[in-house]
Amino acid sequence: MQLVSRPNPYATASSFSAPAWLPGGNAQTIYAFLLRRTPVAFRRERIATPDGDFIDFDWLDGDAAKPTLVLFHGLEGSSHSHYALACAHVARARGWTLVVPHFRGCSGEINATVRAYHSGDAESIEWMLAQIHSKSPLNAQICAAGISLGGNALTKFCGTHLPAAQNLLQAAASVCAPLDLGISAERIAQGFNKIYSAHFLKTMKHDAAIKAKRFPGKFDALRAARAVTLAEFDDAYTAQVHGYSSGAHYYRNASSRYDIVNIELPFLLIQAANDPFVPDYLMPKAHEVSRFVTRDFPATGGHLGFVSGAFPGHLNWLPQRLFNFFTESLRENLRT
């Protein structure tokens, strides 16, 4: 039977197209993760939190007269993630400052409290942005991009903390956010996608085991240790230590899908139609986003793949797309 290609009704025009030598969402996702990375020398700054914990900020200092990009990493990511390093090289070339605030426990050292981080943690996003704002020059132009989990949390912040978002940021972007956490959790637990959940759970369960010894009785340590899906782990640990009654309650309240319509600052939403974790029907239609939101929905790219060029390829498309959007948004802000 011949397969008929049908247009994606949720897609908008995008400048990205995966190379012919790298077909399929899984191949694009995995290859980008494995692609050789050129390291960057960040300057680390540790800042204490009000609840007795710490956040590590990795800075790549640029021209003080130029803007700053704050990059919120994805699940179990860091400043060494492939997308962070790709953005760092473009930031350095453009003279921008780049800072990667690490969610708790993601900077190479387990954090000091029982809580960690989660997809809807808008309050932590606000606190981290406020720290960066306080350390920036007067009238500094600050933009933020969130990747996957970080994109969901940043979208949640921009859509639910409107005055703070407008005060702390000139523009923002979300890349490959799960949008609906319950649906993405189902997707990542199926078929080939189980390889991704096993990868994430390895470090998450390791850290939870340490927390169980430090903070006995604060969460269901046995169920967390036995979890074979992210949904099981989130129900046993993530929800319990972050004030949710269950994993389902966490997924409902932390998803950013319905907050996009409330955003009131220039915002770029990038979602690949062949993302293994996020079905294309979750991509919001025009009437489901605010007038401040630009939708960029390429047909290919996988989950944080976006590999371009002849073999072996490169990861320049995503950082260039982000920096170009922010640059144009800042110009528009000056005109108005």
Image: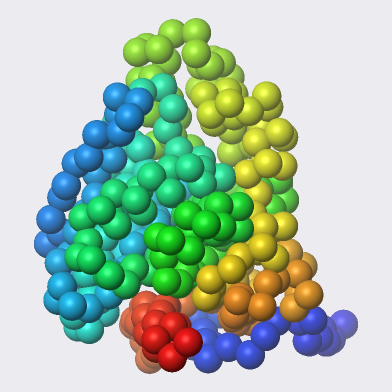
Q: Looking at the picture, tell me which residue is in the foreground, 239 or 204.
A: 239
Residue 209: percent from left, percent from top: 41, 21
> Residue 85's image quarter?
bottom left
**Residue that protrudes farthest toward the right in the picture:** 1
Residue positioned 36% across, 61% down in the render: 71
Residue 37 seen by the camera: no
Q: How many discs mark residues in the rendered view? A: 0
The quarter of the rendered structure image containing the N terminus is bottom right
Residue 168, quarter of picture:
bottom left
Indicate the position of residue 328 as horizontal and vertical percent values.
42, 88
Q: Is 324 left, or right, of 55 in this rendering?
A: right
Residue at 23% from the left image edge and 66% from the top image edge: 138
Q: Is residue 53 left or right of residue 97?
A: right
Q: Which residue is painted at 22% across and 83% down in the image?
A: 94
Give the colour scheme shown: rainbow
278 or 130: nearer the viewer: 130
Q: Is residue 46 visible?
A: yes
Is residue 152 depicted above or below 297 in this figure? above
Image point 78% across, 87% down: which residue?
A: 7
Quadrant of the image occupied by residue 272: bottom right
- Identify whether 236 is placed above or below 178: above
Q: Give the residue at the far top of this rendering.
A: 217
Q: Position of residue 59 (x, y in %)?
A: 19, 59
Q: Position of residue 224 (x, y in %)?
A: 54, 23
Horizontal side, residue 267 vs residue 64: left or right: right
Image: 136 above or below 24: above
